[in-house]
Image (cartoon, rainbow, N blue to C red):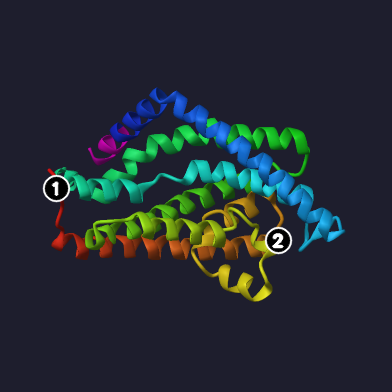
């Protein structure tokens, strides 16, 4: 019965995301414009460096990484923080808490249809195009299966971070500033905007043990097949730790915080 409820929310999310086709179109156009900017920016960086390889990555490697990172961001970002903030400020949270499903699960599965749609519409076509254009740059072997596992854990980590930040809205009743700060930190330290390979050695060592790089850098590194098998398993181990830790922390923090909920509206 529980699985049936989750699948119902998934189906509803798929239907809703398909209905807003213009939103998908605008998102794709926005990503293309961003990628054009990224291309010329990094082309200028490599031209000024005067070498074909910087920090072990060629211009082609960097561009492929950032193109896939952009597609992965479009797929992973579900804006749970804004949804929690709106529910609290409008009073909708009271009704959500009365539903026969835990709010954390309900919110995630409500967005699951959008996740699937964005994965099919943006990430898979991007991966196919990059593969066709670059040839054997992306190996098609066991790394694809490991990549899928890494993406599933990345979704959980990203959602847990969002849910923790969203829970803070129970105390502040305003989430805009906190969420903007969260987005800047995640995008910078996850490797979504700048590959982790370009970080200074000291910062790189610290970042590898933080949860943020597990969201983008770990899945992309596995997909591109640039790391030895031993390093891949270590990265998966770090990712699994943060997946379990942040998942537990988000649940505990929510259960403690929701006891003193105050809402407006309704």
**Which residue sits furthest bottom?**
202
Residue 16 in the image: x percent, y percent?
35, 28
Res. 8 visible in picture: yes
Residue 108's label in the rendered image is none
**What x and y, as percent, mark residue 76?**
48, 45
Q: Is label 1 in a helix, a strand or a loop?
A: helix
Q: Which residue is mark 1?
A: 94
In the picture shown, does residue 96 fall above or below 184? above
**Residue 206 in the image, given as x and y percentages of width and height:** 57, 73
Residue located at (66% from left, 67% from top): 199
Question: Quick one: label 2, few (<14), some, or many (20+) residues within 10 Å?
Answer: few
Q: Main secondary structure of the magenta part?
A: helix
| Residue sitting at x 61%, y 41% | 34
Q: Is residue 113 above or below residue 258?
A: above
Classify mark 1: residues with Cα within 10 Å, few (<14), some (14-19) or many (20+). Answer: some
Determine which quarter of the picture holds residue 21: top left
- Compared to residue 120, the image places residue 172 above or below, namely below
Front residue (pair 182, 136): 182
Between residue 8 and residue 177, name the one nearer to us.
177
Image quadrant of residue 262? bottom left
Using the numbered discs, state the Cα–Cα distance from disc 2 to disc 1 in whole angstroms. Answer: 50 Å
Q: Say which element carries label 2.
A: loop
> Could you tell me which quadrant the C terminus lies in?
top left
Location of the N terminus by quadrant is top left
Magenta segment? 1-7
Residue 172 shown in magenta: no
For the point 28% across and 56% down, the residue is: 174
Dot placed on the residue nearer the N-terminal end, 2 or 1: 1
Q: Residue at x 20, y 65 (%)?
A: 256
Residue at numbered disc 2: 228
Answer above or below: position of 217 versus 112: below
């Amino acid at each position: 019965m529980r699985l049936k409820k989750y699948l119902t929310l998934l189906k509803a999310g798929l239907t809703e995301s398909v209905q807003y086709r213009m939103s998908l179109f605008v998102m794709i156009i926005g990503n293309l414009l961003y990628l054009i900017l990224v291309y010329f920016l990094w082309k200028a960086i490599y031209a000024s460096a005067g070498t074909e390889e910087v920090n072990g990555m060629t211009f082609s490697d960097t561009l492929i990484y950032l193109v896939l990172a952009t597609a992965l961001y479009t797929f992973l970002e579900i804006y749970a923080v804004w949804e929690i903030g709106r529910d609290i400020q409008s009073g909708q949270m009271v009704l959500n808490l009365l539903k026969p499903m835990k709010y954390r699960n309900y919110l995630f599965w409500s967005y699951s249809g959008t996740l699937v749609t964005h994965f099919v519409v943006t990430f898979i076509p991007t991966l196919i195009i990059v593969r066709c254009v670059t040839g054997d740059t992306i190996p098609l072997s066991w790394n694809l299966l490991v990549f899928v596992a890494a993406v599933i854990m990345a979704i959980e980590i990203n959602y847990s971070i969002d849910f923790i930040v969203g829970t803070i809205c129970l105390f502040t009743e305003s989430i805009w500033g906190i969420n903007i700060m969260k987005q800047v930190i995640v995008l910078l330290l996850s490797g979504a905007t700048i590959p982790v390979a370009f970080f200074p050695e000291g910062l790189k060592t610290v970042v590898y043990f933080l949860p943020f790089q597990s969201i983008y850098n770990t899945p992309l590194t596995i997909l591109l097949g640039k790391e030895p098998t031993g390093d891949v398993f270590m990265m998966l181990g770090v990712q699994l730790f943060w997946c379990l830790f942040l998942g537990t922390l988000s649940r505990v923090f929510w259960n403690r915080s929701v006891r003193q909920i105050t809402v407006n509206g309704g």
